[in-house]
Image (cartoon, rainbow, N blue to C red):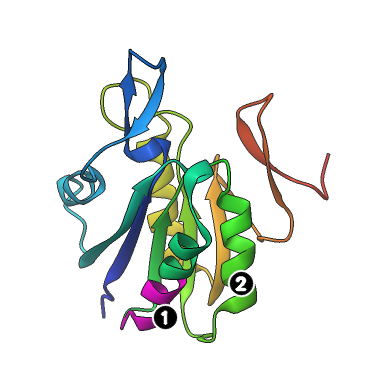
Amino acid sequence: MSQTIHFIITGGTIDSYYDTLSDTARPNKTSVIPDFVKSLKLYEKTEFSVVCMKDSRELTEKDVDNTLKEIEKSPNKQIIVTHGTYTMPDTARFLKANLERKDQTIVLTGSMIPINGFSPSDGPFSIGYALSQVQNLKPGVYVCMNGRTFDPEEVSKLVSEGRFVSIFQK
């Protein structure tokens, strides 16, 4: 029996465009994630909720709390949160510490390069990996980046290498 996978969208580079005037990625006004996921022709049903469209460095406590509330009220047990990479570990730790429900598998993912307008982008792979992992992991909160699954307590973004690492492994 197929379950619905609920995407909760918060913005981040995965859902951004390149702003030439400021020489940086800026979150889109509307998310590209639903159209991208629908183009995959998945067997699983999907649902999408947008909490905000922000660079993760601009997320407020209210934004993170709203993400928690969106997860808690979801009837679905498989949740993918698309999120900016800078504060993804912080949000993952917050969710793990504050979620009352223990029956959901929650995967946070994002990318270093926007999905639209850049080739290659790690965004499509991140979404695919998150889709695979959310269906196979036991309930809990995880960060899925760079083809690896991390516990929120161990994950860190290593900016100098442009990837996520475990603080416990060399």
At x 40%, y 74%, the residue is 71
Q: Is residue 72 magenta?
A: yes
Reading the image, the residue beneath label 1 is 72
- Total marks in image: 2
Q: Position of residue 89 (x, y in %)?
A: 62, 53
Residue, x 53% and y 42% (percent of image)?
A: 57
Q: Nearer the viewer, residue 137 or 91?
A: 91
In which quadrant will I find the C terminus?
top right
Residue type beneath disc 1: Glu
* Circle number at residue 57: none
For numbered disc 2, what is the local secondary structure?
Answer: helix
Q: Secondary structure at mark 1?
A: helix
Crowding at label 2, few (<14), some or many (≥20) Cα neighbours within 10 Å? some
Three-letter amino acid code of the residue under disc 2: Lys
Q: Give me the C-alpha separation between circle 2 and circle 1.
A: 12 Å
Quarter in which the N terminus is drawn: bottom left
Crowding at mark 1 (Cα within 10 Å: few <14, some 14-19, many 20+): some
**Magenta segment boundaries in residue numbering:** 68-75
User: Of label 2 and label 1, which has the lower sequence position?
Assistant: 1
> Residue under circle 2?
96
Instruction: Identify whether 168 is placed above or below 51.
Output: above
